[in-house]
Amino acid sequence: MEFGPSPSLIKKVVDEFLHDMPLVGPVDKLLDDTLIGEDPALEAALAANAASGLLPFDVAANQGKLLNLIARTARASKILEVGTLGGYSTIWLARAVPSDGRVVTLERNSEYAEVARGNIDRAGVGERVEILLGPALETLPTLYAAYPGKFDLVFIDADKENDVAYTEWAIKLCRPGGLIVVDNVIRFGSVLDPDATADKDPGARGSRDVLEFIGAHARLDGTALQTVGAKGWDGFAFAVVTEE
Ligand code: DHB
Ligand code: MG
C-alpha cells in the first residue's frame, strides 16, 4: 500500500511547477554544481532507486547537504530517520556522524529496505546504519525501550498521515536539546486548506496537523521554512525538544 498521491501525479505537479517557474530548476543546478559537486555514491543511489522503481521522493541534493550540515553542527552521533526509501537522505545523515556514531532508519517496505541497504553499503557508511524493517509505529516502541532520550536528531520523512504520531515518539526518543526535522510540510501549498485537497493530496492533513502540533506542544520550540527547488514547492519544519 502506498500513501500520498501517485508518483505520476507528483511528477506532473513538480514538472508543471518547474515549467511555470523556469529559473528554479537551473538555480538548483547552479547551487548543486557550485556547492556540492559530483558525488558518485549519491548519484549511484538515485540510479539504483530509479532502476528499482522507487518513488522519486528523496530530498534534493542541497536539502540532503543541509541535513548533513545541521547534524554536524549539532555534533549528532545518534540519528533516527523515519522513512528510509532508498537511503538517499540516510547517506547524507550517516556521513555526518562520527565513525562510532549510528543512524537508525525505519522502513516498512522490504524492497525499499533492500535497495537502501545496497546504496548505503556502496556509499561506505554501512557500518553506521541500521535499517529497522516494519511499520514505524511498531518499531518505534521497541526503539524507545532500547534508546529512551538518546537521539540527537530525528528526521521524519515517511507517510505524512502519521507525522504527529512520529513526532510524539521523536519527543520521547530525543535528548533535551535534540532536534526534530519534518519533511514535506508545505506540499505545494496544500497545507493551507488540507481537506479541500484530500483526494489529490491525502498527506496534506498530516502535514498541517504536525505544524499545529509543534506550535502547541509545551516541549517543542519550532519553526518551518518553505522551499522551492528541483523538488518543487515544499518545506521543512524544525523543532527543538526542550527539558521536561
Ligand atoms: C511525498 C513524500 C515525500 O517524502 C516527499 O519528499 C515528497 C512527496 C508524497 O508522499 O507525496
Ligand atoms: Mg520527503
Image: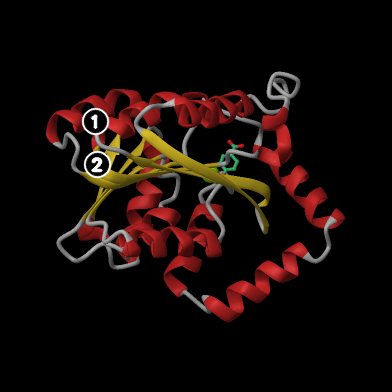
Q: Position of residue 194 (x, y in %)?
A: 68, 24
Q: Amino acid at mark 1?
A: Glu
Ranked by sequence position, the earlier of labels 1 and 2 is 2
Splitting the image into four quadrants, where does ligand 1 fall?
top right
Q: Position of residue 19 (x, y in %)?
A: 84, 56
39 vs 166, left or right, is right
Residue toward you, 37 or 244: 244
Q: Position of residue 78 (x, y in %)?
A: 23, 51
User: Is label 1 in a helix, a strand or a loop?
Assistant: loop
Based on the displayed image, in which of its 4 quarters is residue 242 positioned?
top left
Which residue carries the number 1 mark? Answer: 244
| Contact, mark 1 vs mark 2 (Cβ under 8 Å) | yes
Compared with residue 128, is residue 235 higher up or lower down, i.e. above or below? Answer: above
Compared with residue 6, is residue 95 higher up or lower down, i.e. above or below? Answer: below
Where's the C terminus, which quadrant? Answer: top left
Q: Is mark 1 within 8 Å of ligand 2?
A: no
Which residue carries the number 2 mark? Answer: 176
Q: Amino acid at mark 2?
A: Pro
